[in-house]
Amino acid sequence: MNAKYIRIYQKFDLNEVKKHLLIYGDLSAACANCKKMEIKLDQTRCPSCQTEFKYIAFRNIRNHIPKMQKLLAHRSQMLIIDLDDYNRNMGALKAKEFLK
């Protein structure tokens, strides 16, 4: 089999993504919902706000491809989103709300 990862663009409700997003950095992760830091990659829920993680974004995806593969092998229902896309769209949403 010649399976590789490719990006797929799909519309999502940003507020829903934020509620269930785990943002993974170099050593640990953070909950996008409550900003709790030092969450382990294998945790399915935030230890602080108890949100279930349905989405994950890596700060530097190229450095974390092995972790991504391991994560998806155990939790295939989790969706990986592009952190730059998420941050850009959240910034636009905040600006729109601010200018109301």
Image (cartoon, rainbow, N blue to C red):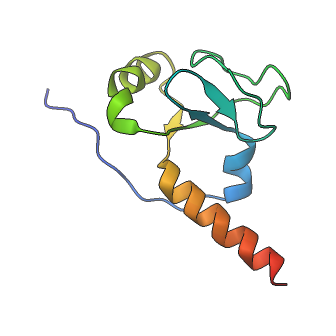
Q: At 36% from the left edge and 23% from the top edge, which residue is drawn?
A: 69
- 48 shown above or below 95: above
| Residue 79 picture location, percent across and down | 51, 38
Q: Is residue 36 left or right of residue 56?
A: right
Quadrant of the image occupied by residue 89: bottom right
| Residue 49 picture location, percent across and down | 86, 29
Q: At 85% from the left edge and 24% from the top edge, which residue is drawn?
A: 48
- 34 shown above or below 95: above
Foreground residue, 54 or 27? 27
- 22 shown above or below 73: below
| Residue 1 picture location, percent across and down | 14, 26
| Residue 46 picture location, percent across and down | 76, 24
Foreground residue, 84 or 71? 84
Q: Is residue 83 left or right of residue 21?
A: left
Q: At 67% from the left edge and 20% from the top edge, which residue is drawn?
A: 39
Q: At 83% from the left edge and 25% from the top edge, which residue is drawn?
A: 50
